[in-house]
Image (cartoon, helix red, strand yellow):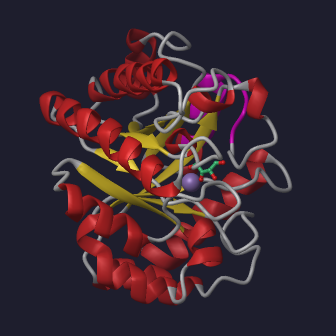
Amino acid sequence: MIRSAVTIALVPQIKTGPWIFWDDLEHSMSKAAELGFDAIELFTASVHAVHSDTLEILLKRYNLKLAAVGTGAGKVIHGLTLTDHDSDIRQKAIVFIQEMMEFGAVFGAPSIIGSMQGNSTPENTHSQSMELLAEGLHILDQHAASLGVKLIYEPLNRYETNLINTLEDGAAFIEKYKFNNIRLLADLFHMNIEEDDPKESIQKHIQHIGHVHFADSNRKPVGCGHAQMKEITDALITSGYDGYVSAEAFPWPDPDQAALQTIRSFHQYFK
Ligand code: LER
Ligand code: MN
């Protein structure tokens, strides 16, 4: 079954980012529950930001699930990526992601690697960076197996990474290295920039897709842009997608209205 989720970011340093709720955790969760979301997707500065006991109590109180845990703060706050030329930083990036994975696994939730994949730089060519990415993901793929959760890898648009931009390249990478526990994130905003045909790409790579970020062409809440949303969401439904569709969009015009617009769109396309 396709389920709805909404992002909550508790990282002040990325306050201009595409996350619906920014406020205090419980207040955001109560709003999500009131609107009928099934789950939340959480972005925190580190595993120390929210105690798992506290999260467990709140998830029960508001009858919500944890859909996924974002790791972007690892790069934004701590400067860590899996492809940094400095092996010490790569090692710290792996530990940061492993801790996030352990935090999420308590709730059966996967962690997402987006910006922590990094970029190839003058110090590392593209192929060297891809090797470093594969080395890091190999360790994390095994960690996912030991925890019994998936790890979600997110192709980003070209302005955010020069490593993997499309579902096709992501799928080829997973197959090349035989990662059994890594699934792709289909972020509809990035796909709107990079995919020739988002619906076809979804149909073709559905077996690799483990999470969806729900946003319109301009990264506003779905319904506020010009993406061909009906054919994209139909592709998810008819291909048998069975995971979360999580609102990662700008809190436009404000968090409450963005959440309301998102859940209305979710019902329009998926119910
Ligand atoms: C993270 O999910 C993502 O999509 C990035 O573009 C955030 O900057
Ligand atoms: Mn995303």
With 271 as the anchor, is 165 left or right in this view? right
Asked whether 6 falls inside the magenta stretch, the response is no
- Residue 64's place in the image compared with 54, above or below, is below
Residue range corresponding to the magenta coloring: 21-32
Magenta region's main secondary structure? Answer: helix
- Residue 96's place in the image compared with 238, above or below, is above
Residue at 76% of width from left, 73% of height from top? 224
Front residue of this view, candidates 261 and 138: 138
> Residue 76: where, in percent of width, then height?
68, 31
Front residue of this view, candidates 33 and 134: 134
Residue at 44% of width from left, 48% of height from top? 128
- Residue 60's place in the image compared with 14, above or below, is above
Residue at 49% of width from left, 40% of height from top? 40
- Residue 23's place in the image compared with 120, above or below, is above
> Residue 179: where, in percent of width, then height?
20, 51
| Quarter assignment of residue 132 | top left
| Quarter assignment of residue 75 | top right
> Residue 119: where, in percent of width, then height?
58, 48
With 211 as the anchor, is 105 left or right in this view? left
Front residue of this view, candidates 127 and 40: 127
With 105 as the anchor, is 185 left or right in this view? right
Quick check: can you spot residue 1? no
Residue at 54% of width from left, 81% of height from top? 195
Front residue of this view, candidates 79 and 128: 128
Asked whether 28 falls inside the magenta stretch, the response is yes
| Quarter assignment of residue 261 | bottom right
> Residue 217: where, in percent of width, then height?
70, 75
Number of residue marks: 0
